[in-house]
Amino acid sequence: MSAPILEARGVVVAKKGRRILDVDHFGVGPGEIVAVLGPNGAGKSTLIQVLGLLERPEAGSIALHGRAVGRSDEFSARKSLACVFQTPLLLDRAVRENVELGLRFRGVRTDERRRRVEAWCARLGIAELAGRRARTLSGGEAQRVNLARALVLEPEVLLLDEPLAALDAPTREAMEGELGTLIRGATMAAVFVTHHRREALALGDRVAVMLSGRMRQIGAPGDVFSRPADLDVARFLGVENLLAADAEGVALRFPNGVALQGVPGPGGPVMVCLRAEEVRFLAAGVALDPGSNLLNGTVVALTPSGDGHLAHVDVRGLALAARVTRAEAALLQVRPGAPCEVSIRPAALYAIAAGSAGA
Amino acid sequence: MFDSGTYAEVIEITGRTLLVSGSALVVAVLLGVPAGVALAVRRSFPGRGLVMALVNTGMGLPPVVVGLVVALALFRGGPLGSLEWMYTIKAMVAAQGIIAFPLVVGLTAAGVQQLDPNLVLQLRSLGARGVRLGWILLREARLSALAAIMAGFGGAISEVGAVMMVGGNIRGETRVLTTSIVQQTRMGDYETAVALGLVLLVLAFAANLGFTRLQQGGRR
């Protein structure tokens, strides 16, 4: 990451004696989207408010372009930022007036205001709504206006607090990709807070996992999802297989005697993280990836999951979850009680030292 | 109902009633609306709970007590005696303003507090602050704000105890509709008292009709 535009340095926020935010360092670089992923109550919204200079931390500071923002600079520094909250919070006025509100506050000239409002309304597909009263809009339309109101400011950093959470699933999915395109197209940096793993994966250049007010892991989405920093993170990220084992070199021995080849990692008692999509059912005679672990077992149950199934497989007492599409399940005869062959890539077995519950 | 002399006096009393209660309302609104917005927006200053309790108590202030306090302050030996407001319209405006003020503050604060608390954050993030922020919040809570103004006007125009004490019900100088009704009733002239009561009701109704049209117009 190049030098961050906006940073939180040693930020602590406490309410009623309880620390709800405790971040050593967090930053977002130019043109970067950082998705902050965490459960409800993790402190994500507070992080957005602190980064947006809307709430002062008890300790630490917010820096813009490397310079800590003091009380006297807050108002002017806020002009580099824009926030989008979960609920649209539109004023009871016409859509156009709502979109241009921030530009008015920031003293942008009338002709420039008009140009930007028209351009952003068109980009967000709300040009035809410009004359409508905000309270007559649907949830999806209102959230588009909410986004337009922030994007029209063309901030250096856009701060989004679960902007899609209040939308129905089809609207949310449609807006997910669109939002990424809009932000990247406008070459602004963004911090995007969500509790949806898929949104974080879809939008984030980096993903930060936040639990109980602390940043527990920050990295590329693929790294974070396949190599969680600790057990809490792994559980939150929904790693389907968390298996106790003993590690010696690259060998992983499970209590029931099953042994698998992994990759170099910590030795001794470990918890092995394995994504269900990495447990692949094999058709007889299909060549394995070189070095893959091959296991024979029995399908115990199939549960619907997303577009396919989650198959529960018993390998000599070792319970594994494997993701399988409906077509694969039919083709490979994956059904309860059926014997099966599965393969697991060594690199998919990620071991973390047992008892690493994180900070 | 009235002979021509009485009719002229009723017109004069009605005009004075409007002048006193209208002025009191203007004072209460000018001071009370910003105070109500500030109370609603600043949710964590020390002593806020006490201030809110005082405002809520003030919403039920007995007019006679207000009259007594204002009279004690304005009597020649009182702390504000040098103003020489006692038994003048100014004293009546002050008393009715004190009655209307907490009603305006309390109901404005309640109305603004009903808005989503994140709206303040959203507006601040867009660049609003100070008076501009308060004005936008007030516009969003305009139905409640107008209800607050109506309540303040109702509290002012309908009270009798305070204006009687500080105005003295002096014919041609400080007599208003409520004090006049009391006077006529004491004198046994129930017909005039009822007629004056009707005038007061029509006045209150007309004012509230105007406020209501303003309030409901905002819903369209």
Image: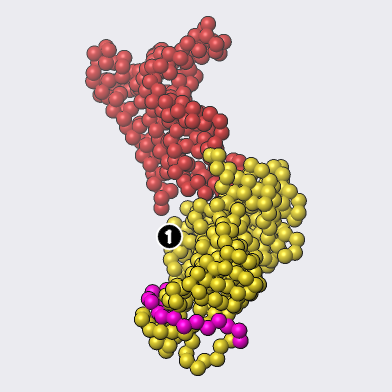
Residue at far bottom of view: A285
Residue at far front of view: A257
Q: Residue at x 68, y 60 (%)?
A: A28
Q: Is residue B100 visible?
A: no
Q: How is the image coloured?
A: by chain
Residue indicated by mark 1:
A136
Q: Is residue A300 above or below residue A204?
A: below
Q: Which chain is represented by red in the image?
A: B
Looking at the picture, how far across and down is residue A296, in whole percent? 46, 83
Q: Chain A appears in which tint?
A: yellow
Q: Please tell me in which quadrant of the rendered image residue A84 appears.
A: bottom right
Q: Residue at x 39, y 20 (%)?
A: B63
Magenta span? A290-311
The tally of labels here is 1
Looking at the picture, how far across and down is residue A83, in whole percent? 59, 56
Figure quadrant of the N terminus of chain B:
top left
Q: Residue at x 72, y 47 (%)?
A: A69
